[in-house]
Amino acid sequence: MQSHRRQLIAHVLPMVLFLALLALCQLVTAHAHAFVLRHAEFWVYPAQTILCGALLLYFRECYAFRGLKNVGFTILIAFAVFILWIAPQQFLNLAPRTTGFDPEILRNNPALYWSTISFRFLRLVVVVPVMEEIFWRGFLLRFVIDERFERVPFGEFTSASFALVALAFTFSHSRADWLAAFVAGALYNAVAYRTRSLASCVLAHAVTNLLLGFWIMQTHQWGLW
């Protein structure tokens, strides 16, 4: 049985590091003139992938994924969140989200371009879903119920934990995505309640992000990253 302190660190530290690196990226790009600093996302995002991924591997024994359950329901939720995320531009005719992490500026260097795309998809489809589901559903959804969260069965429902996690998940995204993020947070919570499986929550998030990544590459709506 892992100690409470180790469980807490394992569930929170990867997210804290991820957000700290994201804040560093925003700080550097806002005040820089040199290309390497003005486009800090090209090295900060790989750093997030490598460092946060390494932490997840290091603490892997602390996470109880419990195997996939209700896969059909999980995939349905993943697809619904994807549709929801692209709906403003695709169905409501809002302005395309073209400003953001744009790998096209590296097109003249194929090796750098494809390595950047590979790291971006590794971050988007593997590291972020695992890390965020460990934090939001594995930790916070239970921590609101009992600060000794590891004693709370995964998928335990209370209205307070449901609402707080959905709202916190919302505000962790950019303002333009708040409505979609709120519904997505609620739906991913529903996966946790229905399946009682962290692995299923990760799968839902990963499939959504994979679909979104392909959509972004096809439409060049870089602001949806």
Image (tube, rainbow, N blue to C red):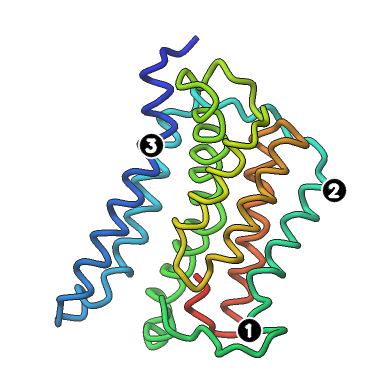
Amino acid carrying mark 2 in the image: Gly
- Neighbour class for label 1 at 10 Å: few (<14), some, many (≥20)? few
Residue located farthest toward the top when viewing the structure as drawn: 1
The part of the image, by quadrant, that contains residue 180 is bottom right
Q: Which residue is mark 3?
A: 55
Q: Earlier in the sequence, mark 2 or mark 1?
A: 2
N-term mark: 3 or 1: 3
Mark before the other along the chain sequence, 3 or 2: 3
Q: Is residue 46 left or right of residue 216?
A: left
- Give left or right: position of 96 versus 195: left
Q: Dot 1 corresponds to which residue?
A: 89
Q: Which mark, by number, is residue 72? A: 2
Choose mark 2 or mark 1, whichever is in front. 1
- Quarter of the image for residue 82 reads bottom right
The residue at the point 52 percent across, 37 percent down is 134
What residue is rendered at 44% in x and 67% in y? 174
Badge 3 vs badge 1, beta-carbon distance below 8 Å:
no
Image x and y of residue 160, in percent: 58, 36
Mark 3, secondary structure of its residue: helix
Residue located at (57% from left, 78% from top): 217
Q: Position of residue 57 (x, y in %)?
A: 45, 34
Rounded to the nearest whole Å, what is the CA distance between mark 3 and mark 2?
30 Å
Q: Amino acid at mark 3?
A: Leu
- Give residue 47's mark: none
